[in-house]
Image: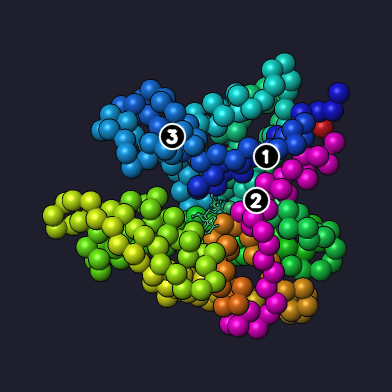
Amino acid sequence: MPKGKIGIELGTSYLRICANDKDDILQIKNVIALNNKMKLVAVGNEAYAMYEKEPYTIQVISPMTHGVIGDYTNMRRLLHVVLNSYTKRFRSYSYYAAVPVDISNIEKRAFYDMILEAGVHVKSVDLLAKPMLDAVGLGISVEEPKGSMILNLGTDTCEISVVCLGGVVCSRLLKCGSSQLDSWMMQYMRRQEGIQIGKKTAEKFKYQYAKSQQDKTFFIKGRDVVCGLPKGKKIPLSVMERRTYEFVHQVIAETKDMLERIPPQLVSDIMAGGIFLSGGGSNFFKVKSWMEEELNLPVHTRLNPENTVIQGLKVICNQKNDR
Ligand SMILES: Nc1ncnc2c1ncn2[C@@H]1O[C@H](COP(=O)(O)OP(=O)(O)O)[C@@H](O)[C@H]1O
Ligand SMILES: [Mg+2]
């Protein structure tokens, strides 16, 4: 019988899990709901459905912040519950986890310890560099002596990395991400339109804007700030354009900075091969053209860019047969 292998990606928004003996990938919201900060009420999508609607006795918590484990205890509880129902009994597993490169050794150690504690029938735990998994998931031939640049735009982090010869040459983790657009939208609605809206509504607006190729309007429902009664208004999707550009521009500035620091031979590889975009934040229709214009390099996008890391993990789980 082949050995059991499980791949885990702990994102700020989503927890993604794959295994060598299952075809489908599990993707759930990385959220846990607790009663009086103690008793477990729900995990994943069920817990997320409670978000912004919870009574005062229930707390809905996102245990990951800025690409690292922000709330160790609750992340361990959440992962344990999910793995318990995902794994098969009477089988031991080797665990592979995607971990950012530009974090401290203590933060990396926390990933290791947590999976060791939360895992079911753990045989071994291996931490793998997230940019490498991204590259594998994107279909880049990582072992070749040819540098590739990958930009992963996530929920509250953006990772800019250069990979070559099966390793990471350099990587920077920026503390900015596409969720800052949700917060901005909430603020915009309150200040400009006098309507208070929730984060989920703001995110829905962002999704509509991301895929729109022409200017349309979106009907937003919320509460009037003055009279406190329900209120709705049609808002043009283009209100988000300037703010999205500012977010992308931040990433572009850091990318330019990295291009100045890496060896020139790698720059020439990147000029030929272009830049690869991944992560949920690269779903914006205009990101590709903005980047191409400012960086003067070809930029490659793909469908479902948020899944590249877990797809890379799936390839690794299916391949590695050394333990
Ligand atoms: N189709 C989409 N359009 C716009 N934004 C999206 C889309 N899909 C995902 N996102 C945004 O991308 C982020 C999630 O990306 P993901 O790579 O899964 O993040 P992480 O790995 O940090 O959890 C969220 O902020 C989400 O709102
Ligand atoms: Mg991601």
Q: Give residue 182's position: percent from left, percent from top.
A: 40, 58
User: Callout 3, which amino acid?
Assistant: Ala
Report which residue position mark 3 lands on: 47
- Quadrant for the N terminus in the image: top right
Whether the residues at callouts 2 and 1 have beta carbons within 8 Å, the answer is: yes
Q: Give residue 34's position: percent from left, percent from top.
A: 38, 29
Q: Identify which residue is drawn at 39% across, 70% down.
A: 236
Q: Identify which residue is drawn at 52% across, 67% down.
A: 212
Whether the residues at callouts 1 and 3 have beta carbons within 8 Å, the answer is: no
Indicate which disc, 1 or 3, sits on the residue closer to the N terminus: 1
Report which residue position mark 1 lands on: 25
Report which residue position mark 2 lands on: 307
Q: SS at mark 1? A: loop
Chief secondary structure of the magenta portion: helix
User: Callout 1, which amino acid?
Assistant: Ile
Q: Give residue 304's position: percent from left, percent from top.
A: 64, 55
Q: Is residue 300 magenta?
A: yes
Say if disc 2 is inside 8 Å of ligand 1: no
User: Callout 2, which amino acid?
Assistant: Asn
